[in-house]
Amino acid sequence: MTELVGLADVQAARELLGGVTRTTPLEPSRPLSAALGGPVWLKCENLQRAGSYKVRGAYVRISRLSAEERARGVVAASAGNHAQGVALAAGLVGAYATVFMPVNAPLPKVAATKGYGAQVELVGNTVDESLVAAQTFAERTGAVFIHPFDHADVIAGQGTVALEILEQCPDVRTIVTGVGGGGLVSGMAVAAKALRPDVRVIGVQAASAAAFPPSLRAGEPVRLPSFATIADGIAVGRPGELTFTHVRKLVDDVVTVSEEDISRALLMLLERGKQVVEPAGAVGVAALLSGAVEVTAPVVAVLSGGNIDPLLMLRVIEHGLAAAGRFLRITVRCVDRPGQLASLLGEIAEHRANVVDVVHQRANPHLRLGEVEVALSVETRGVEHSDTLISALRASGYQVVFTGEG
């Protein structure tokens, strides 16, 4: 039997974190409250030190090391948030940190980790591969391996998020949070179920990187053969042994959301909530928006991190607009004659759609003689507006040969 972390462990972790981490705000969400018919709040761990909740567990773990262990240094593996949390925590206690990150880790996260004083090594294509490299480094050098989720101290530290939620929203009925390896949801479930057994704790994974559902069905941690998602912070191929036990015993449900759901959530949070959130930090909101889970209000959704690559943000915003029917890519074939392009653009303008870019092609071998192809990116006001625009273009004799969603 794997011993569960207890409420006393989480409360002790909170004492350790006094003066180290911030009590992050709980902000109301009008769009989500209207959609769900009851109060919905956002726990803004994207505003935590180092940009995510990860510093909580990392500091608790590292601060409890002996002087001899600190002298050997610490090593970790992460796509970014745990890396920054370990780097910051190690600096606070005076330990040298080495962090292994995937080669495709977002550059801002790599730069921030270095900025906190850690030595960064880029190894592997996934966090799982980086974990192997970090563990090998620990065995070779004697550095203490700081697991991103599968350790009692880490789970206890992450559980302090739930203590704050229960104080900030005493009547909460449902807590929804993203799940990667399971450290955050495990710790939060420990605290919530001990203090308020009636509170439902729901975990959310990206559908294309969801290791917990098959593991729960199998009754043991199962490794995914492959996984890929824009939510790099929760792209973990196998649950931890300790976190799996916690999730199986304490978490009410684990649901999944699509990449499109995540994009829509990020866009809503940016537009309506004025919150900069990374994809992994938005999956709880994605579950609420998509109806992936039935909840009882008041609901608290945890925005677990805000460390998003600006380039990824641009792509996600475009993808989110497309998923919401507000960004349209169309290719139109028409007669190649003077004024034809101006006529096409004029008709789009008449329908109050905004053309973002235009590519005018004559060299496509699939075109007939005297025919031209125009590829356009167009901003619209939604699905109905997009459908109206396409119908109007076709009614005017234009051949819309491709309609894409970005």
Image (spheres, grey):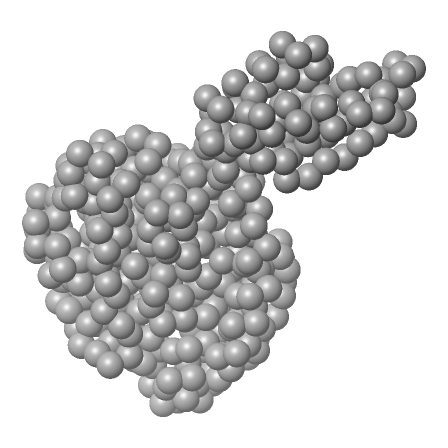
Residue at 49% x, 58% y is: 308
Q: Say if 3 sits above or below 257 in the image.
A: below
Q: Say if 324 sits above or below 5 in the image.
A: above
Residue at 33% x, 36% y is: 289
**Residue 81 located left or right of residue 37:** right
Q: Say if 169 sits above or below 60 in the image.
A: above
Residue 384 or residue 323, whichever sits in front: 384
Residue 140's spot in the image, x, y percent? 57, 75
Residue 169 or residue 192, whichever sits in front: 169
Residue 211's spot in the image, x, y percent? 42, 41
**Residue 338 located left or right of residue 99:** right
Q: Is residue 385 visible?
A: yes
Residue 81's spot in the image, x, y percent? 44, 63
Residue at 85% x, 24% y is: 338
Query: In the figure, residue 56 lies in which quadrant?
Result: bottom left
Residue at 46% x, 21% y is: 384
State which quarter of the image contains the C terminus.
Answer: top right
